Image: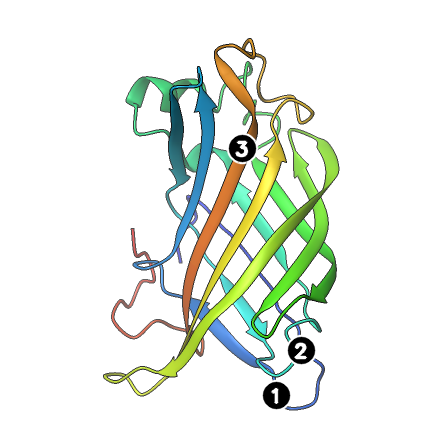
């Protein structure tokens, strides 16, 4: 498991024997973000590395909790110059605030395969409520490895200015950051096709 970026998600089931432990397949998992640039593009970026392990009850998704921790230094804007600036004092100030943290406070089922997940997001020392809209995409037995394989999509809208990470004028860079997590995971403690679980 890498130490460059550590992301922990814990989906805790109802202790009824239905909950199972999963480990993220980092080859097929992405933490993505977008923000408006001058009204011309929806600028895209990501966080490169992460570790995700969780316990998930497929029969009752609402009976779950999630906790996420992301090192700021792993932000990737696809520009080496911007990558060097974003962790700096003028933006995330990673030296003082190295982690982005999210912890759910309530999960409400909204459909057959969807939940609304409310929680507290901490960025740059400020903690505010954020809502994720989560879809359970699928759960199958992997045809090659014969392990249960699950997939999720989670979306949220985050105000970058109230967290103090966006001091650029509004005409240049927008306020709202759209976050999307595409997650695949295998049942168990390891991913079968890479021993180190690096999956970069």
Q: In which quarter of the image is the N terminus?
A: bottom left
| Sequence-first disc among 3 and 1 | 1
Q: What element carries label 2?
A: loop
Q: Would you place residue 105 above or below residue 124 in this image?
A: below
Which color scheme did the rendering employ for the protein? rainbow
Mark 1 Cα within 10 Å, few/some/many (few <14, many 20+)? few
Q: Give the Cα separation between the discs numbered 3 and 2.
A: 30 Å
* Residue linked to disc 3: 177
Q: Of discs 3 and 1, which sits in the foreground?
A: 3
Horizontal and vertical percent position of residue 17: 64, 91
Q: In which quarter of the image is residue 186?
A: bottom left
Horizontal and vertical percent position of residue 146: 31, 88
Q: Identify the residue shown where x is 54% and y is 49%.
A: 155
Q: Quadrant of residue 33?
A: top left
**Res. 18 mark:** 1
Q: Identify the residue shown where x is 56% and y is 12%.
A: 170
* Residue linked to disc 2: 13
Q: Is mark 3 on a helix, strand or loop?
A: strand
Nearest to the observer: residue 97 or residue 45: 45
| Sequence-first disc among 1 and 2 | 2
Q: Do the residues labelled 3 and 2 touch (CB within 8 Å)?
A: no
Q: Is mark 1 on a helix, strand or loop?
A: loop
Q: Give the Cα separation between the discs numbered 1 and 2.
A: 7 Å
Q: Of discs 3 and 2, which sits in the foreground?
A: 3
Q: Would you place residue 193 above or below residue 83 in this image?
A: below
Q: Would you place residue 87 above or below residue 51 in this image?
A: above
Could you tell whether 61 is left or right of 36 in the image? Answer: right
Q: Do the residues labelled 1 and 2 touch (CB within 8 Å)?
A: yes
Q: Identify the residue shown where x is 32% and y is 56%.
A: 198
Nearest to the observer: residue 74 or residue 111: 111
Q: Would you place residue 68 above or below residue 197 in this image?
A: above
């Amino acid at each position: 498991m890498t130490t460059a970026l550590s992301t922990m998600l814990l989906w805790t089931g109802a202790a009824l024997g239905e909950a199972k432990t999963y480990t993220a397949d980092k080859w097929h998992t992405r933490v993505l973000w977008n923000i408006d640039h001058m009204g011309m593009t929806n600028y895209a970026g990501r966080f490169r590395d992460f570790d995700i392990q969780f316990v998930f009850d497929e029969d009752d998704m609402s009976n779950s909790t999630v906790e996420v921790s992301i090192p700021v230094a792993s932000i990737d804007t696809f520009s080496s110059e911007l990558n060097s600036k974003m962790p700096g004092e003028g933006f995330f100030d990673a030296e003082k605030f190295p982690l982005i943290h999210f912890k759910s406070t309530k999960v409400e089922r909204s459909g057959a395969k969807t939940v609304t997940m409310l929680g507290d997001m901490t960025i740059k020392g400020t903690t505010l409520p954020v809502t994720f809209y989560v879809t359970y995409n699928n759960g199958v037995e992997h045809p090659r490895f014969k392990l249960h394989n699950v997939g999720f999509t989670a979306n949220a809208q985050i105000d970058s200015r109230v967290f103090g990470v966006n001091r650029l004028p509004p005409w240049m860079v927008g306020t709202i950051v759209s976050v999307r997590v595409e997650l695949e995971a295998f049942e168990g403690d390891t991913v079968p096709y890479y021993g180190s679980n690096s999956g970069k």
